[in-house]
Amino acid sequence: MENLETWQYAATALIFVWTGFVRSGLGFGGAALGLPLLLLVVDDPLIWIPLIGVHLLFFSGITVGTRLSAVDWSFLKKAFGIMIIPKMVGVFGLLTLPTELMVTFVYIMTLLYGVMYLFKYQIKSQSNLFDGFLLVIGGYVSGTSLIGAPLIVAVFMHRVAKEELRNTLFVLWFVLVTIKLSVLGSVGVDFWWIHHLWLLPAAAIGHVVGLRLHDYLISQDAGYFKQTIGAILIVICLIGLMR
């Protein structure tokens, strides 16, 4: 992060605007839709994950700080109990697995998300067993790279009331990311604190726009929006995998 070229700084700022918009507008996906782009700038997840994680804590905290009554605490506790062990396994995998393998993993997972969005495929389940499976896999993926949100949301969308969904997810992200960053901090991973001075304002722009569009996005058919995102993700991931 200390020796980036001008285009890399500019690209990073724009990507953080995008992640802020997605996170507050949809309630999830800031990391899943931002990390693949950031890896095209610098292909090391351990550089970007602390930055994304701190932003998520900051913005999720100010978003739900006055909305804690609109959280489904009952289901949140159940889901957390299922996810915590695979979450920790994923965090330690991030620290021990080769960087090239982790980058490839991020691109492959995101490529799958892009295909799902492009072809309007939505993971659905009416089975408690399958819900548990998705939460376990989502917890592990979240632990390795913070991109497990689409798998986790697939469960929460039909278990949590629509008006409580975003706030409940934000509380979950806050807890999961706190655990992840605590582990990373304990082993000496650099959090690049000085760079938050210019990246937080960039993310704040996207956050404010996302908050204003949130009600529209959840009340309208966002199919075309997701299809466009899916197509872009596929192109980005293919470029990243070829690199």
Image: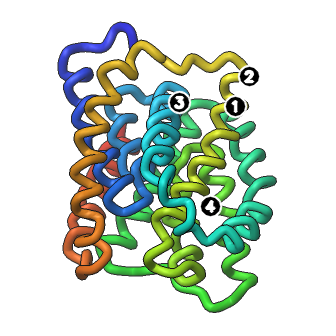
SS type, badge 4: helix
Which residue carries the number 4 mark? 138
**Drawn side of residue 30 relative to residue 14, left or right:** right
- Up-down relation of residue 128 to residue 214 (above or below): below
Which residue carries the number 2 mark? 186
- The CA distance from mark 1 to mark 4 is 19 Å
**Label 4 or label 3, whichever comes before in sequence order:** 3
Please say which color scheme the image uses. Answer: rainbow
- Up-down relation of residue 190 to residue 212 (above or below): above
Where residue 50 is drawn, which disc sits there? 3
Circle 3 packing at 10 Å, graded few (<14), some (14-19), many (20+), is: many
Instruction: Using the image as rendered, state which of residue 224 and residue 210 is in the foreground.
Output: 210
Splitting the image into 4 quarters, where does residue 137 fall? Answer: bottom right
Residue at 43% across / 30% down in the picture?
43
- Up-down relation of residue 235 to residue 168 (above or below): above
Where residue 182 is drawn, which disc sits there? 1
* Quadrant assignment for the N terminus: top left
CB under 8 Å between callouts 1 and 3? no
